[in-house]
Image: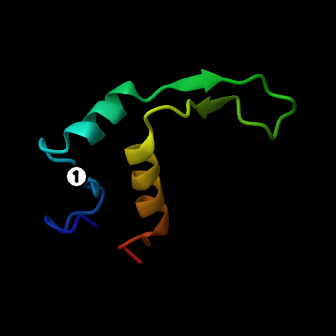
Amino acid sequence: MNPITGEMGSPRLFIFRKCVKTIEEFIGYEWQAVPAMDDRDPVDKPKKFNDHSMDQNRYVMATRPDPSQ
């Protein structure tokens, strides 16, 4: 549920214009193809370059419970 509108299915992550570095990281975020060794291996993984804000966002989102529960 969106914290502002109260609607289900609405965005829960808001990035404002002043978050210049975060926006730059989202734009420049890249994935590299990785050959799969078997069916359990991921075929892509993110490149570890200029990704501090991306890591921070991932940690915050992973530790927040679903507000609809």
- Residue neighbourhood size for the residue with mark 1, other residues' Cα within 10 Å, grouped as few (<14), some (14–19), many (≥20): few
Q: Residue furthest bottom?
A: 69
66 displayed left or right of 24: right
Q: Is residue 2 above or below residue 20?
A: below
**Residue at (19% x, 44% y) in the render:** 19
Q: What number of labels is visible?
A: 1
x and y, in percent, of residue 36 in the image? 80, 27
Residue at the spot 21% in from the left edge and 69% down from the top edge: 3
| Pick the front one: 20 or 10 | 20
Which residue is pictured at 28% across the width and 54% down the height? Answer: 13
Label 1, on which residue?
A: 14
Q: Is residue 5 left or right of residue 55?
A: left
Quarter holding residue 44: top right
Q: Given the image, on which type of amino acid does mark 1 rest?
A: Phe
Quadrant the N terminus occupies: bottom left
Q: Is residue 66 left or right of residue 36?
A: left
- Say which residue appears at 42% left-offset and 78% top-offset: 69
Viewed as shown, does residue 58 lie left or right of 33? left
Q: Nearer the viewer, residue 48 or 67?
A: 48
Q: How is the image coloured?
A: rainbow
x and y percentages locating residue 7 in the rendered image? 21, 63
Q: Residue furthest right?
A: 38
Callout 1 secondary element: loop
Residue 49 at x, y percent in the picture: 49, 31
Which image quadrant for residue 45? top right
Q: Nearer the viewer, residue 44 or 49?
A: 49
